[in-house]
Amino acid sequence: MTEERATEDGAAVVAAVEAVAERLEDERDHLTQLDSAIGDADHGGNMARGWAEAADAARDLDDPDAETVAKTVGKTLMAEVGGASGPLFGGSLVFAAGELDGGITPETAVAFAETYLEKVEDRGDARVGDQTMVDALTPAVHTFKKSVEVDDLDPIEALTKAVDAAERGVAFTVPIRARKGRASYLGWRSVGHQDPGATSTLFILEELLAVAADRLGVDAPETDAASPTIPDDDPDGAADDGSAAAPEES
Amino acid sequence: MVGIVVVSHSERAAEGIAEIAAEMAGDTCIEPVGGDGKGGIGTVPDAIEAAIEDAAGGDTDGSDAGDESDGDADGVVVLVDLGSAVMNADVAVELSDAEAAIADAPVLEGAVNAAVAATDPSATVESVREQAEAARDIEKL
């Protein structure tokens, strides 16, 4: 990897972190509202504040590469976000950052996503169906990996499908019962509530997609969670190539 | 010698627990750590990592073959209070170069048990953690 390329990748990560910080500030009240229903109403404030600090720390770096930015952001989130979100969002980022030491390619992005998911699952001891951020993250990471490695989609199409998958994952948290985190103390009363951590995870992924599309000079694609990647019930339908979510050239 | 780290959401609680455990601890190094770093309730992985390094005696770079015999770096057992303190301690253990393990034990009783166990000249991280975890079965009435 050339030095110029390394700096370019680093600048892309800084831009992504700034976009995430701005988005989470915009969604502060929304996230707080979700958290007040089932938790301690601090997710919006903690995330907005933590990511703002992380964006500052990222901007202060001198021509960093992608790994350095990701690690710095993770460290800042660990120190600033507080609660379980600090180690989950920040700690996982610190460890996954190592996957970007060769810069950002579709392959390193997949490795990064998989390590991040693995850390979140292990640290939080959570699996799909526990009404946590894992419900958004798992389908997003799996979809991204399949789109890159099996379907050979370009990075923006792959990321678009991942965002769609995360959006469906967020919707999936509503009808289920929380088994991890503070909401689990509510038992059945957690049913009917959308998980704040899954929601903020979706916002982060949406901003990653927007910044990636912008950096690659592609129009930000429309995400459409209502068009799943899996084939629908109509065997004659054209939807089984998943093209509804992201129009393909072929 | 095995060191001990006491992690609590409250810095003062961590210090108080370390104070109680130190009564039983002989020369054992007990490092309290807690608080969000700004005077509030919480825990910070970096601070916990620093406490682990301190409790390990500072000689944790793994570069010296003499680690086994110098008696200063036999590892660290970490006692934690609740919720995100456990996750943050987990991150700190993973980041640290020292041999460290979290004990799944009540923080005060576990710290006292660990302090006693660490005074055994043949103590290891495993033996100290085991004694700390035996505190789960302590009955008070």
Image (tube, coloured by chain):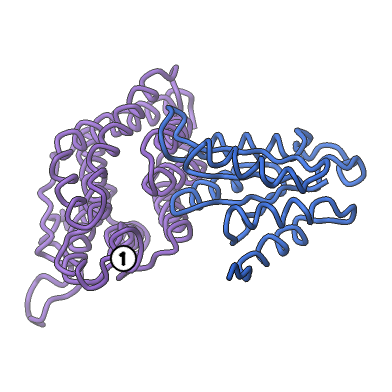
Label 1 residue SS: helix
Count neighbours of disc 1 (C-alpha within 10 A) and say few if under 14, some if 14 to 19, many if 20 or more: some
Q: Which residue is drawn at 44% across and 34% down?
A: B36
Q: Which residue was labeled with disc 1?
A: A184
Q: Left or right: where does residue A76 sit relative to residue A158?
A: right
Q: Position of residue A115 (x, y in %)?
A: 46, 53
Picture quarter with the C terminus of chain A = bottom left
Q: Which quadrant of the structure image shows residue A232?
A: bottom left
Please say if A46 is above or below A250. above
Q: Left or right: where does residue A171 sit relative to residue B14?
A: left
Chain coloured blue here: B
Q: Residue at x 90, y 40 (%)?
A: B70
Q: Position of residue A154 (x, y in %)?
A: 27, 50
Q: Nearer the viewer, residue A141 or A29?
A: A29
Please say if B47 is above or below A118. above
Please say if B99 is above or below A173. above
Q: Left or right: where does residue B100 sit relative to residue A239?
A: right
Q: Which of A171 and A227 is in front in this view?
A: A171
Q: Residue at x 52, y 38 (%)?
A: B34
Q: Nearer the viewer, residue A193 or A150?
A: A193
| Figure disc tally | 1
Q: Residue at x 79, y 52 (%)?
A: B118
Chain coloured purple here: A
Q: Which amino acid type is shown beneath numbered disc 1?
A: Ser
Q: Which quadrant of the structure image shows residue A16?
A: top left
Instruction: Provide the chain ID for the residue under circle 1.
Output: A
